[in-house]
Image (tube, rainbow, N blue to C red):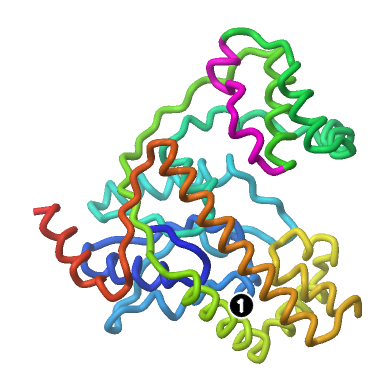
Amino acid sequence: MLGPTASGKTLLACQLAYHLNGEIISADSRQVYKKLNIGTGKDLKEYKIKGEKIPYHLIDICDANTQFYLHDFIRELKKCFIDISVRCHIPIICGGTGLYLEALEKDHSLTQIQENHERRKELNELSREELIKLFREIKSPPTQKAIIPVKDDIETDSKKRIIRRIEIAEYLKDHPLPEKQENIYKPKYIGVKITKEERNKRIDARLKYRLENGLIEEVEGLLKKGVSHERLQFLGLEYKFISFYLLKQINKKELFTQLSTAIHQFAKRQMTWYRRMEKHGIEIEWVELENAEQLISSLKDSRQ
């Protein structure tokens, strides 16, 4: 289950879990962190349908000061998926982090290659154009090219992703390929369909509610517990802009307007990612929330 932020995917996933004897596995890169509740939209009250609690996994599993990487998600996802499946329940993976969602389809053996923080500092000084040129000039063995080919879509990659490509390519020049991992998933991707206008309306209403109901206090509490402003600014837009506000770099009005704009842009990037997934052959069935009953009925029928 995927969709842009504020689309209602969590509630729909919980409804599916209720009717299909399922359990939720979160595919959200921030909900793994403890004490990040309001800003990450955990909305744990939604994990209860008609009085029945819906089991969930990969939420609140690590401290906010501990970095949770893609290879951590892949490892924990597999554990949860197998555990749920052997109990004859249906794993329902729900979230908006495209990188996590694509992990169901891709060979992510390369995530075993550790980050080279010193090299990253050097590369971060280069422009995107310089990074792309550097990546394309790296001499690599045929086996490497088969796994990380030079694709045209590198032009649309973020600077962070280009640096990771270089990091992997440079590692593989002097090291063997990591062992390929078996893919145990055969996912059905369901996306929540929502108009841009409705999405932005929901984002603004949700943000206003959160700011008035504890989000700022949540960030203040994290600071008191030893989470630095630098770390907060790495934990997502809400924590980043509230950090700016608490540092008196922006005022209350600017907090709402700048954060709202940033979340709208984030939702747009999510949709761009999903379209790229479809372009690369991943089929997504898009459904509107008002058609939830029809979706549930069709999935029930397909299981019989």
Among all residues in the image, which is located at the extreme top? Answer: 142
Q: Position of residue 221 (x, y in %)?
A: 76, 79
The magenta-colored residue range is 143-158
Q: Secondary structure at mark 1?
A: loop
The answer to which image quadrant residue 268 occupies is bottom right
Q: Position of residue 4 (x, y in %)?
A: 50, 63
Q: Is residue 152 magenta?
A: yes
Q: Is residue 258 magenta?
A: no
Horizontal side of 303 relative to 290 (left or right) equals left
Residue at (34%, 61%) from the top-left corner? 23
For disc 1, the neighbor class at 10 Å (few under 14, some 14 to 19, many from 20) is many
Among all residues in the image, which is located at the extreme left? Answer: 304
Total tally of numbered discs in the picture: 1
Residues 162 and 110: in front is: 162
Q: Position of residue 162 (x, y in %)?
A: 71, 35
- Image: 210 above or below 141: below
Residue at (73%, 70%) from the top-left corner? 239
Query: What quarter of the picture does the N terminus occupy?
Result: bottom left
Query: What quarter of the picture does the C terminus occupy?
Result: bottom left
- Magenta segment, principal secondary structure? helix
Horizontal side of 284 relative to 268 (left or right) equals left
Horizontal side of 60 relative to 191 (left or right) equals right
- Image: 254 above or below 54: below
Residue at (76%, 73%) from the top-left corner? 222
Q: Position of residue 160 (x, y in %)?
A: 73, 42
Q: Amino acid at mark 1?
A: Ile
Name the residue that disc number 1 marks: 38
Residue at (50%, 47%) from the top-left corner? 76
